[in-house]
Amino acid sequence: MKSALNMNEVSTLSTVLLTNLDENVFFSKISEFVQNEFNEYKVLVFETYQDGSTVLKAENGKLVKDGIEYNKGEGLSGYVSRMKRAYYSNSKRDPLLATTKRDDCVESELSVPMNIDGTIIGTIHVQSSNEDRKFNEEDIATINNFLKEIETPLTNLKMYLIAKHLNKQLQNQLEMKEQELLNRGPALNNGKKSAKKVEIIGHSNTIMNVLNTAERIAKEDFPVMLIGASGAGKKLLAKRIHNLSNRAENECITVHCSAIEEAQLEVELFGKQDRQGIFEKANGGTIIFDCVEDLSLNLQAKILRTILSGEIYRVDSNIPTSVNVRIISTTRGSLETAVEEGRFREDLIYRLNIVSIDIPALSERTDDIKVLAEHFMNNGKDKDQYKMLTSKALEKLIQYNWPGNIQELRNVMERTYILADDRYVDEHHLPNLVQEVKEEEVIIEDFSEMTLHDLEKAHIIRTLDHLAGNKTRAAKALGITVKTLYNKLHSYGLVQPKAE
């Protein structure tokens, strides 16, 4: 073994790993590097799955197809993954190795877990055929120092593997459920639908935190509020929560609150004597209120009554009907301003916002742009028709602010696929993505003749103009409460007093 790590080689390897999230390439490169450092008989790398099972992925820098697999706790890899600490054996008679398959010539073996913030993604094994070779704590420290130096690419790989495993588990669960329904036959299905897979693309820490939160709350059955800009994926996440919930086999109906006139929307929600409304159709399932801030106060009151009583009244009936639905709401921003302006009921917020999830804009998850862009380009295409982004094209996409978020990216990439003749999409194939910059008129005022009251009024008005009238943000910028801001605006005659 070399006396110390070659930091230039470590740095080069780290750069290579940062540009690749294929676990096969990842583990092969790691085994190759460790083999060069230790120069022993074999260096093996096992991948550890979330259920604790392990599978051999790489040997001496080469990918292993259909490698040895161990169930949870079996083999040295399973033991090290379960215990989350390194282990070395300098004896062929070690009872711990009884369930481990290895060559007869191996005299000693060292195994170190790849532990990323408490998650084991794999194990590194160094095997020696030399009778005099005895592994020790110094060898463990060498590998741990190496893993520390490549911590960033390992963290990226961990998040990618978590997303991959979750998607695989969800797909397996859906396939099992579909098969179960098929086995029951149509007579036992009761008209219920099996959940369809809802795929949310991305591996950045930001989106993974959102997905992990959504998965944890999916089966809890309480109302959820999803907050994010237009096109950020709120409705998609809402459907994913439904499909992960215990209501997945029942209806999930989206209500576009801003698209239907109030009277018609009331009929659509609560029904009439000769037709069911959405609450009845979604009984046992989920209703998604998209842009809930656009609901009228009248409908807000009736929805609140339904939440509290579990009953609805059809528009032309006084007979109550029991319903059991889960409500997921989406909004483009905080509802605090709508409450302060009297456009939204504060008591309804408390009922809808048991848990809220902030969905990041695309500009906040630039690590996902490449995978999203190539997914939108190649979705539905055969593999031999796939196109890839060059580094220049990716740089252009990342530098753009994406005010339309994921929906805008989808439109751009679907158009780009058609217009690009080559397999590799370069920056000139992309449309002219120019961020709109608003020029602000500079106004120079003479404050020498203004009273303190007028100065305060001018400053408040200018702050509101700068923040597009958002009173919550304006109050924060001014260092006052929203209530104080409203009192001042009322004193200036700019707003009506808030109704008690």
Image (cartoon, grey):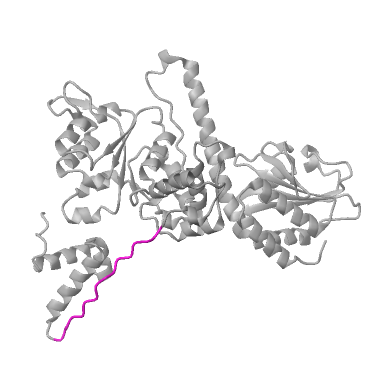
Front-lying residue, 290 or 414: 414
- Left or right of 475 in this view: 71: right
Seen at 30% across and 28% down, the residue is: 283
Residue 279 position, x and y percent, is 26, 30
Left/right of residue 347 with respect to residue 46 in the rendered view: left
Q: Quadrant of the N terminus?
A: bottom right
Residue sitting nearer the eye, 298 or 393: 393
Majority secondary structure of magenta residues:
loop
Does residue 73 appear to the left or right of 405 in the view shown?
Answer: right
Query: Residue 396 at what x, y percent from top left?
Result: 48, 59
Closer-to-camera residue (173/254): 254
Above or below: residue 327 compared with residue 131? above
What percent of the width, then of the height, locates residue 214? 43, 44
Figure quadrant of the C terminus: bottom left
Q: Is residue 112 visible?
A: no
* Residue 210 seen in this snapshot: yes
Is residue 468 a member of the stretch shown in magenta? no
Would you place residue 73 above or below residue 399 in this image?
above
* Image coordinates for residue 448, horizontal then vertical, percent: 15, 86
Which span is picked out in magenta? 433-448
Label tally: 0
